């Protein structure tokens, strides 16, 4: 009888842990994407000497590993409006106003590091430049810290 009780307890606890892990992963991903987008905005504003008022971020769902995750982002990051937009709507938006900034963000978050690639489009969907932003996990502060930012401009 005790074994049956123990077995049921283990199954119940493992099921609960999986649910918590999933929501925790979404929270961690949301925090990391917000941090990376904020760092991108700061670095790009400094390099381009312009200030973004709105950034359209690709909300790609193509069943690929680099799809944009199912997370919540704040509506503003670094005083910049953030709009998640499908690739189809982005094409329409770019045709309406060529100066709009459209970004494809790909991110990989691991226990000890995180990597992001920002592919920037504008002028009617012309590829403008890329930023690679890397983070390293600081065990003492229990936070990801900016490690490296690499700008890659044309020609590609």
Image: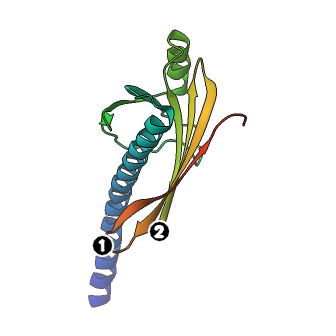
Of callouts 1 and 2, the N-terminal one: 1
Q: Secondary structure at mark 2?
A: loop
Image position, residue 42 (x, y; %): 41, 41
- Residue at 31% x, 77% y is 8
Image position, residue 63 (x, y; %): 57, 42
The residue to which callout 1 is attached is 13
Vertical placement of residue 123 versus 11, above or below: above
Locate residue 25: give its quadrant. bottom left
- Quarter of the image with the C terminus in it: top right
Q: Residue furthest right?
A: 155
Vertical placement of residue 94 versus 20, above or below: above
Image position, residue 4 (x, y; %): 31, 83
Return the residue nearer the eye: 151 or 12: 151
The residue to which callout 2 is attached is 112
Q: Residues within 10 Å of mark 1 (few under 14, many from 20)?
A: few
- Quarter of the image with the N terminus in it: bottom left
Vertical placement of residue 14 versus 30, above or below: below
In-image side of 4 versus 108 (left or right):
left
């Amino acid at each position: 009888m005790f074994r049956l009780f123990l077995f049921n307890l283990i199954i119940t606890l493992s099921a609960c842990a999986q649910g918590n892990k999933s929501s925790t992963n979404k929270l961690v991903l949301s925090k990391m994407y917000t941090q990376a987008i904020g760092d991108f905005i700061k670095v790009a504003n400094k390099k381009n000497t312009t200030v973004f008022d709105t950034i359209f971020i690709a909300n790609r769902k193509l069943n690929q590993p680099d799809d944009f995750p199912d997370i919540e982002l704040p509506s503003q990051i670094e005083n910049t409006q953030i709009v998640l937009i499908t690739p189809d709507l982005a094409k329409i938006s770019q045709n309406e106003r060529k100066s709009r900034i459209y970004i494809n963000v790909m991110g990989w978050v691991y226990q000890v590091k995180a990597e992001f690639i920002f592919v920037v489009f504008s002028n009617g969907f012309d590829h403008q430049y890329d930023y690679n932003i890397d983070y390293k996990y600081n065990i003492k502060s229990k936070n990801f810290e900016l490690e490296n930012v690499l700008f890659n401009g044309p020609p590609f």
